[in-house]
Amino acid sequence: MTELNGIVLSRLPVLPLRGLTAFPNMIVHFDVGRMMSIRALEAAMKNGQTIFLTAQRELKTDTPTPSDLYQIGTICQIRQILRLPGDNIRVLVEGKTRALAHNFIAAEKDEDCMYAEVEELEDYVYGVTERRAQALVRTAQERFGEYAQYASRLSPDVELTVAEGGDPGYLADYIAQNIPVDVAAKQEILEELGITRRLVMVIRMLGEETEVLKIENEIQDELKTQIDKNQKEYYLREQIKVIQTELGEQDVAAEAESYRTRVLDLKLPKECEDKLIREVDRFAKLSGSTAEQGVVRTYLDTVLDLPWNKKSEERHDLAEAQAILDRDHYGMEKVKERIMEFLAVKSLAPDLKGQVLCLVGPPGVGKTSIAKSVAEAMGRNYTRMSLGGVRDEADIRGHRKTYIGAMPGRIMDALRRAGTSNPLILLDEIDKMGNDFRGDPASAMLEVLDTEQ
């Protein structure tokens, strides 16, 4: 021991704590693995088993220097040392009193440890009546009771000890030792020598921790509710599968799931995908005996068979196009010249829409065959749609889904047969369309030929 300005200082080995704070009159156990800490233990065992424990400011610091340690710590008595497999040592210590390190002495040799000249600190209580101290103890007990309702890993022994009450200073230290808060917050309580002020700090800390735990529990309850909901839905779906199996309708659920997979695999625009998913959900809910299920199945089959993402690569080689037209057709100079103009415009403005060629002439002069040559010249798939004798608008637009046996219009059917989204479609015998009480199909063709509509 030494004396500085009338203050008695004790020279004790220092053991830095990571993520842990030791309080007076508390039993603390921890594992030691760093060489400087092991040397401190060995030095303490030679010096009456007394050691100075203080927390380090940063957890990541592996070899702390005096500036990395808090000056106020706890003088502890080593009660037990247990060597674990490997190089670790488990230590059981009992806190004795708070202490202030006036000076840290770094290790002089590699086999030495850090020492500190420490002054023992005494708790004090001034200007506080016994009733106020008792009121603070009761408040701390109530707040701890609220905290214990939300803390899941709290030992019953801790609750019982707090419920017994006792000295305000001891109660504050005991609560701070047994709740999981930051080292910096515990250090503030350790450094507070005023008993009542220390208890007020603990009460405030309990209130903050209780609010945090409330929010955490609310989040956990929401997650549990969501999980329970998902489990319930899964259970109900499994029941539906069993019922459908008993009724012989198991194929419907499997077919609906197959449709759903096909829709998602197409990577369609969101509007189209949402519409088709709604139709798949309707299909899954319909009974196999209803006629509407057949209508929805036909609709889904038709839409999914369309070439959504298939597109043929166009060619804009005018010389090759001229050679193909000359190879397939002799003469027809004006017609071929008009077609070449059409292809030239297409090559200059590939994104131009609304280009429709009208071929007029008597039967047998090559109107249909030259359209096939144009498709070959452009590198597009070719499909022919005969309109002779069409008298119903539904043949063009498609039938309403509400009708049994509803079919798509001839335009959609031609796209499906072509296999690509940019085919060359020949509307053959367009002048042979008629009209009657079922409507005017020629007027419905405006929707096909007018890009603005």
Image: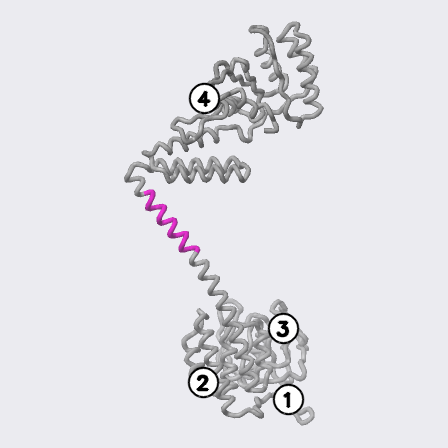
Q: The magenta stretch spans which residues?
A: 226-241
Q: CA distance from mark 2 to mark 4?
A: 94 Å
In front: label 3 or label 1 = 3
Q: Amino acid at mark 4?
A: Arg
First-in-chain label (3 vs 1): 1
Pointers 2 and 4 in contact (CB under 8 A)? no
First-in-chain label (2 vs 1): 1
**Where does residue 289 sit, x and y in percent of width and height?**
32, 34
* Element on which disc 1 rests: strand
* Element on which disc 4 rests: loop
- Disc 4 target residue: 438
Q: Amino acid at mark 1?
A: Leu
First-in-chain label (3 vs 2): 3
Residue 389 is a magenta residue = no
- Disc 1 target residue: 9
- Disc 3 target residue: 57
In front: label 1 or label 4 = 4
Q: Residue at x 54, y 30 (%)?
A: 308
- Disc 2 target residue: 165
Pointers 3 and 1 in contact (CB under 8 A)? no
Pointers 3 and 4 in contact (CB under 8 A)? no
Label 4 Cα crowd, 10 Å radius (few <14 / some 14-19 / many 20+)? few
**Where does residue 72 sit, x and y in percent of width and height?**
62, 81
**Where does residue 422 sit, x and y in percent of width and height?**
58, 25
